[in-house]
Structures are given as structure tokens and as C-alpha cells.
């Protein structure tokens, strides 16, 4: 799976893809992440990529020409299943969307900065707009790291245990049940006896009950989505 990421500040993405699970996925050839610096596509000797808004108003806007040139250059190399713009006014990213994106082969992410990008780029190229929450960040780099991480861990072979991602919170509209590890007793707090029983059927039933109870208490809206 390939992620091509267009960024005005590519150095912000160096660390998220250089460690842990994502690093191993790249090394194993299961994931390819390319961060493309938008600045070389900028105009003039100063490589300008932003300008003032038409109509006035605070904040600079990323210009259409540099983004269009970069996007068209990337399109010459591969066909994209989705071209995604990360924006606070996009559809809220969730586990269901991550599941669907994990089935794609090539995805381009366009990262906004300053006040955003010229609307014409959104009209001409973007196939999906995503937000990671109802708040505003300085740019799309952190949301891009979130999306890539959430999607990549669903690719077969990325996690050591292929079933691990299937039991995460928000799969099947449930939060994950409590989890425990050794020791069996810690400062007077014991692991539930059922988890020590060795009875897989009863353990699965307990975990499902706990997941439903936790979801009902913390995120009842997820249960209503099943109806």
C-alpha cells in the first residue's frame, strides 16, 4: 500500500514514520510512505506557495498552481484510489473509514497549512475530505500521521497478531474491554477469575459483556449506530 503525502512542512512527518509498527511495515515492504515537499513546486526564486485571500480576511491561502503541479506530477507515476484533503471541515475520520481505506492500493494525502488551500484544488482533484476532530490544528501533518497509522495497522502482516486490530475499540461499534497482564494480583487488585479459567468460550462472553457495558456507560452513541 502506498501513501503519497504532499506537505508544506515535511520535516514534521519524519518521526511518526521512523519508529515502531510503521517503520517495520515499511521495512517489510507492506507499506510505502512518501512525503513530498511542496516548496520546490512554488513560484519564483522564493518558491512561494501561499498568498493573500481574495476578498480580504486574516490568514494566507495555499496557492493552486504549486499544488496542481505537484498533484499532476504524482499522477504521472501512479493511479490513485483516493486523493484526500485533510481539513477540519471534512468528514470525521473513524474506524469504519480506516477499514475501507485499508483495502485501497494508492492514496494521496494533501495537507493544508496556513488558512487552507485554494478551493479550486478541492474541486479539481480531491475525492475525499477528512477531519480527525472538531478542532483546528496548524497544519495537516499530525492528522496525516493519525490516518496513516490507523489504516496501516489494518494491512495484513503489519501487526504480529493478525487478529489484534479486529478486537480494537470501535470495531463493531464497541469499545475494547478491560485488559490485564501479569502479575495476577497487584497492590491488592486481582485479575478477574474468568480470565484465569482457560475457558475460551466464557472468556469471549465476558469480554463481549464488558465491551457492551463500557460502551453503554462511556459512548452510548456507538450502540445507537447499530440500530
Image (cartoon, rainbow, N blue to C red):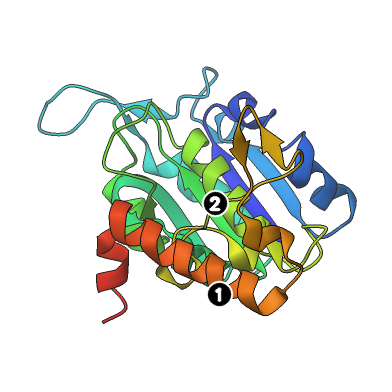
Q: Quadrant of residue 173?
A: bottom left
- In the foreground, 189 or 29: 189
Q: Give the x, y percent position of residue 86.
A: 41, 47
Q: Residues within 10 Å of mark 1 (few under 14, many from 20)?
A: few
Q: Residue at x 77, y 34 (%)?
A: 19
Q: Residue at x 46, y 24 (%)?
A: 48
Residue at the farthest left position: 55
Q: Residue at x 76, y 53 (%)?
A: 32
In this rendering, the answer to whether 167 lies above or below 202 is: above
Is 30 situated left or right of 58 in this image?
A: right
- In the foreground, 78 or 181: 181
Is 179 situated left or right of 2 in this image?
A: left
In the rendered image, the quadrant that contains the N terminus is bottom right
In this rendering, the answer to whether 141 lies above or below 220 is: above
Q: Is residue 9 visible?
A: yes
Q: Give the x, y percent position of residue 12.
A: 59, 26
- Residue 205: give its label: 1
Residue at the farthest right position: 28
- In the foreground, 107 or 148: 148
In the picture of the structure, the residue carrying the numbered disc 2 is: 178
Q: Is residue 75 visible?
A: no
- In the foreground, 26 or 60: 26
Q: Residue at x 64, y 63 (%)?
A: 194
In this rendering, the answer to whether 78 lies above or below 202 is: above
- Residue 81: give its label: none
Q: Are marks 2 and 1 in contact (CB under 8 Å)?
A: no
Question: What SS does tag 1 mark?
Answer: helix
Q: Give the x, y percent position of residue 122.
A: 34, 55
Amino acid at each position: 500500500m502506498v501513501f503519497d503525502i504532499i506537505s508544506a512542512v515535511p520535516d514534521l512527518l519524519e518521526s511518526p514514520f521512523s519508529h515502531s509498527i510503521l517503520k517495520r511495515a515499511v521495512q517489510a515492504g507492506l507499506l510505502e510512505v512518501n512525503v513530498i515537499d511542496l516548496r520546490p513546486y512554488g513560484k519564483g526564486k522564493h518558491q512561494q506557495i501561499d498568498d493573500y485571500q481574495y476578498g480580504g480576511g486574516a490568514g494566507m491561502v495555499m496557492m493552486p498552481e504549486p499544488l496542481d503541479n505537484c498533484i499532476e506530477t504524482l499522477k504521472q507515476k501512479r493511479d490513485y484510489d483516493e486523493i484526500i484533503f485533510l481539513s477540519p471541515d471534512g468528514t470525521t475520520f473513524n474506524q469504519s473509514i480506516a477499514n475501507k481505506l485499508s483495502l485501497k492500493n494508492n492514496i494521496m494525502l494533501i495537507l493544508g497549512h496556513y488558512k487552507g488551500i485554494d478551493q479550486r484544488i478541492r474541486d479539481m482533484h480531491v475525492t475525499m475530505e477528512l477531519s480527525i476532530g472538531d478542532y483546528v490544528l496548524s497544519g495537516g501533518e499530525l492528522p496525516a500521521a493519525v490516518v496513516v497509522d490507523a489504516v496501516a495497522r489494518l494491512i495484513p502482516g503489519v501487526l504480529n497478531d493478525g487478529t489484534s486490530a479486529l478486537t480494537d475499540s470501535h470495531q463493531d461499534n464497541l469499545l475494547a474491554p478491560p485488559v490485564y497482564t501479569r502479575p495476577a494480583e497487584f497492590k491488592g487488585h486481582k485479575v478477574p477469575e474468568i480470565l484465569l479459567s482457560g475457558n475460551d468460550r466464557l472468556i469471549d462472553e465476558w469480554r463481549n459483556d464488558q465491551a457492551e457495558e463500557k460502551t453503554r456507560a462511556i459512548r452510548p452513541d456507538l450502540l445507537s449506530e447499530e440500530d
